[in-house]
Image: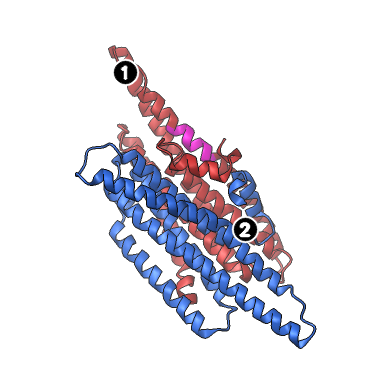
Chain colours: A red, B blue
Amino acid sequence: MFMEMTMEEFLNELASDSPAPGGGSVSALAGGLGAALVAMVARLTAGRKGPADLEEKIEENLQVTLRLRQNLQEDVDRDTAAYNEVVEAYRMPKKTAAEKEARSRAIQEALKGATQLPLQVAQRSLEVLRLSLWALEKGNPNTWSDAAVAALMAQSGIEGALANVAINLDGIKDNTFKEKMKAQAGEIRREAQLLREKIGDPLGERLS
Amino acid sequence: MFMEMTMEEFLNELASDSPAPGGGSVSALAGGLGAALVAMVARLTAGRKGPADLEEKIEENLQVTLRLRQNLQEDVDRDTAAYNEVVEAYRMPKKTAAEKEARSRAIQEALKGATQLPLQVAQRSLEVLRLSLWALEKGNPNTWSDAAVAALMAQSGIEGALANVAINLDGIKDNTFKEKMKAQAGEIRREAQLLREKIGDPLGERLS
């Protein structure tokens, strides 16, 4: 759906007064843009001199990052679809006790879907961040800024997707589910933090 | 140019083994996506109860953010154009002393353009970050995650654009120009840091 729109059309949809697409889809797109940049760095690093296993590693990481890109592109649509299910559930009739119960159950189910999807986006963006670190360390030095932007987009994908997890958790009543999701989100944030520490602040060093 | 491409086509171009478009264009796009999200938050906040001057402020910030979005969208193209000028300058003939000098002058001019453009992207993304803080503080609470993603995209726009400033400064010989650009980049980073401190870690609080 969104991937067939022009960039201009997508930004128009985003800026409109309709809540979807919103930050969830943009987070998946951010991860996808990061993955595309890692793929570019890998391709511009192939054929250069390096350790014996460099070419093999490039090909391996290229395949992984292209798969992540594809998945994250699809998540751009999926996030909006998950949001729309929540909206539809809220619109269900609520006159009789049976209707009220069916509606409430549908809302809870839809909200769970709308937290699981961004959690998956955060996990995929974490993989992109890991690949960005590799691109920064082993990539063609001429593509350093591309690898740096890949890392930034991956980080935004992680944090943005987790913001969507957090806001949808607010309406969920199942405490076991909530705690499990919070624990997974916390774990992703910790791993991202470790990767960020490994990356450090190369920009600050270059600008000093 | 890029804004008329479908999203899929743009990501294909990005992932290809051609250096342009690359991280510079993605940084401008990140700022533009942030601006579009701030516009959405502003529109979904209009008409809600709030202080007397809220509607006026919404309309004012909406106009500013839509202008920033337009400018940053155009910067997606301009960044790639600035990069292409560097490539063309490097391709100039260098047989005679006169040719060598003309080429060297053209490279230096093109590199300066390719640092000034991303510095402008960083400045515009800083404005988007400022508006994101407003969206986080005054926006419709249901759009909190959209405002949070806007702030993340703006930050990536800033840091990513400055990474492009930094890599192009490497080849510039004019030390006065270099120092001036580094000082401006440092100032933008400091202002962004202050805004980030004001934002804090609302995600961590929500997930705890």
Residue A187, above or below A76: below
Q: Residue at x 57, y 35 (%)?
A: A1
Amino acid on which disc 1 is placed: Glu
Find disc 1 in the rendering and name its residue.
A101
For the residue pair A176 and B39, the one nearer the viewer reads as B39
Q: Nearer the viewer, mark 1 or mark 2?
A: 2
For numbered disc 1, what is the local secondary structure?
helix
Amino acid on which disc 2 is placed: Pro
Q: Position of residue A138 (x, y in %)?
A: 61, 67
Left or right, B137 with respect to A62, comes to: left
For the residue pair A7 and A55, the one nearer the viewer reads as A7
Q: Position of residue B25 (x, y in %)?
A: 56, 58
Let me know if residue B172 is in the magenta part.
Answer: no
Q: CA distance from mark 1 to mark 2?
A: 52 Å
Q: Residue at x 28, y 13 (%)?
A: A97
Name which quarter of the figure residue A2 lies in: top right
The answer for which chain carries disc 2 is: B
The crowding category of the residue bearing disc 2, from other C-alpha atoms within 10 Å (few below 14, some 14 to 19, many at least 20), is many
Let me know if residue A82 is in the magenta part.
Answer: yes
The answer for which chain carries disc 1 is: A
The stretch in magenta equals A75-83
Q: Residue at x 49, y 71 (%)?
A: A202
